[in-house]
Image: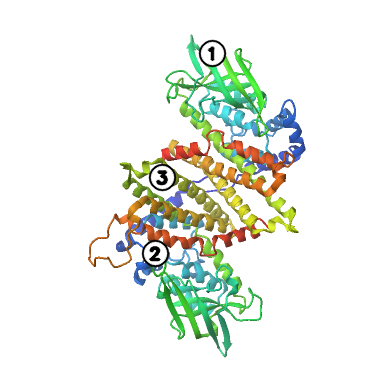
Amino acid sequence: MNLEFTPEEQAFREEVRAFIAENYPKHLADFGMREDMSREDFLAWHKILGKKGWSVPAWPVEYGGTGWTPTQRYIWSEENARASTVMPLPFGVSMVGPVIYTFGNAEQKARHLPGIVSGDVWWCQGYSEPGAGSDLANLKTTAVRDGDHYVINGQKTWTTLAQHADWGFFLCRTDPTAKAQEGISFILVDMKTPGVEVKPIKLLDGGYEVNETWLTDVRVPVENLVGVENKGWTYAKFLLAHERSGIAGVARSKRGIEKLREIAANETLDGAPLIKDFDFAKKVSQLEIDLAALEITELRTLAGEQAGKGPGPESSILKIKGTEIQQRLTELTLEAVGTYSAPYHGGVSNDNSNEHPVGPDYAQYAAATYFNMRKTSIYGGSNEIQRNIITKMILGL
Amino acid sequence: MDFNFTEEQGMVRDGLSRLVREQYDWETRRKAIASGAGWRPEIWAQLAELGILGMPFSEADGGFGGGAVDAMIIMEEFGKGLVVEPFLPTVVCAGGFLKHAGTAAQKEEHIGAIVSGERVFAFAYAEPKGRYDYADLETTAKKDGSGYVLNGHKAVVIGAPWASHLVVTARTGGDRRDRSGVSVFVLAKDTPGVTTRDYVTVDGRRAAEVYFENVALGADALIGAEGEGLALIETVTDEAIAALCAEACGAMKVAHAMTVEYSRQRKQFGVPIGSFQVLQHRMVDMYTSYEQAVSLTYLATLRLGADEGERKKAVSAAKVGVGQAARLIGQEAIQIHGGNGVTDEYAIGHYFKRLTIFDSEFGNVDHHLKRHVALS
């Protein structure tokens, strides 16, 4: 047993660190809220990595994966967190991509995987509906076979960044008589198809990160069905398990705690740096301890993966603890900035001037980020759903 | 990075697991801790025979070349069975002092006798008013010729009633809470002037108040440099904390499993109480805290050899996280066992008691959170 990296792993770290330093776009070095970013900004690093062959490390090598060990992938994510990079979005890379290369046919692989690897095609996820959140299997969107097409009708919601999407993967009911989990199919939809309408939803932080997606008589060729008709639930669950691994965000939270300490060293309380206040410092230490535990828990899971075990129900622990820590981090950052948590920085300044926003730079996004991160314990299967999974799969109740 | 045990470590774990399962069943343990002696020397003899007592010593010192990971494996198995025999004070604490700072003669005299099971040690560090500060000492060792004269009162010395020997901390110079002036001594418990008041602890072990009245010690009783013992004490107690955390993990694992099983058996409103989501989620929270506690125990154990700052931070993180998990799991286990949880008859209550006292050993959650802050 040991926690040391091998000389080869150390060398790998140096290599990726140097690559990031040389190639990461300078103007994206310190981005604020991601919904302020353009499509090009989102895809910039993805495209660079696509050319380098590093955009989909976890994929099988034949489809563009790097063949890195789980430990190398961990080092890769650590180094990206260290440089606060804008990573490729998960919808193509970690969600639909693995479903296509695992369950799709040869034509689907040839048609869709290269665009995900290169970062040219933007995907979005059509899962949740107004009446199907945690109870996802209760979804009502239908796909009715009509010759060599499916005709899709229904409404999806929380479609993240669909305003930029070229393609979407949708769960649709293809057999209305079957019981809930059966009769669902996994269908790929070109977002430019007539009848697809994306309506933005304004969120607590003032941004537009998610959308309602309306589908009215959308005609989709049958060759866009992935796998077997009515077996979509199997693929949906597969995808969710993939989504959860890596959701812990340990490396990003580590960087977040460093930033929090910097902020708290700059803020003052009774004339002394806030970080010297024991009550506050204690909360930061507690968070750091919880994160240290999670880091080892994640490494233990990775070691299991390296030994050939797939992402199992333990990934639910990573999701629960990881998101709790991310939320706590934004909460303490909000506390640290104090009074300057209040000014709203949503686009237009109230005096219509071009002046620098009020307050210190680090305070600008503290409240927005805190509001935004409430989503983490809700998405990807809410933390209560994760507890149900652990109850069933690990406790055996 | 590697989280696997070696083949040998796997064998130690299996052997010990079998011993605890076959010879440390609940009824036998209950009788043993209520007996006059309060422990079973025959178990100690078997631990010696299995090589457990010599595991963490180097081969040069007469041991079997193991280390902190071996101590962790051993303590986890002891925790599962609530084993009371004094492995921690004898092998981890006294053994640790001898390993790190003992002279060739001291090692020669004591380590072989520890490995063979012949000598049992207790570690007398706490004092009635010292709380968790190892430097806050009223016990003194005054220079007398080439030797020392020891006077003072040590509190709650775990395993002292069973011990043949003691490791004692005392002030040889400086003021009461100074970092310098602290020294460590090793002596036989039957040295003239040593008296004890023995008692049982709430978690089924034995301890004593130990009094020293003009106890004459030779120069050879001193371990390490005179007046510079604090760093040594911190090294050894950090090792003890990592081992103690492993013991708590073993106890938590069993307490959680017992609770899940109980919820499967116990019926109310016509159904097993384990079918209620409100209890399921609480048992999941117990499980995730346990897994996080295991991770912190690994971290502390694997950082014992790191530089001082990193070591202390990892150990304090573990004592905080494991302490919080122990509190949560203990309390929730009792709650889910309902009325049966508060009876002496059910084993769960005894796991709860051990997990409760764990927090007060070598610094509680508050103490180590404070140390973590100071190191950050």
Going by the numbered disc 2, the residue's amino acid type is Asp
Please name the amino acid that badge 1 sits on.
Gly
Residue at disc 1, secondary structure: loop
Q: At numbered mark 3, what does the secondary structure look like: helix, strand or loop? A: helix
| Distance of label 1 from label 2 (alpha carbons) | 72 Å
**Mark 3 residue type:** Phe
Q: Residue at x 73, y 58 (%)?
A: B269
Query: Counting other residues with Cα less than 10 Å from the Cα at mark 3, is it few (<14), some (14-19), or many (20 or more)?
Result: some
- Looking at the image, can residue A322 be seen? yes
The dot on residue B218 is 1
Q: Quadrant of residue A330?
A: bottom left
Residue A280, label in figure = 3
| Numbered disc 2: secondary structure | loop
Q: Report whether residue A84 is seen.
A: no
Above or below for B258 versus B241? below
Please, which chain is the residue tagged with disc 3 on?
Answer: A
> Does A5 sit above or below residue A106?
above
Q: Evaluate whether label 3 is on the same chain as label 1.
A: no
- What residue do we see at 24% from left, 67% from top? A352
User: At which x and y percent is residue A210?
Assistant: 44, 71
Locate residue B62, reporting x and y percent: 60, 28
Q: Chain of mark 1?
A: B
As drawn, the residue found furthest toward the top would be B145
Residue shown at 67% from the left, 27% from the top: B117
Q: Quadrant of the C terminus of chain B?
A: top left
Q: Report which residue position mark 2 lands on.
A: A205
Mark 1 against mark 2, which lies toward the viewer? 2
Report how far apart the C-alphas of labels 2 and 3 lie in the structure.
Answer: 25 Å
Question: Which chain's residue wears label 2?
Answer: A
Where's residue A26, x and y in %? 30, 61
Check whether the beta carbons of the residues at disc 3 and disc 1 lie within 8 A of each other.
no
Q: Residues within 10 Å of mark 2 (few under 14, many from 20)?
A: some
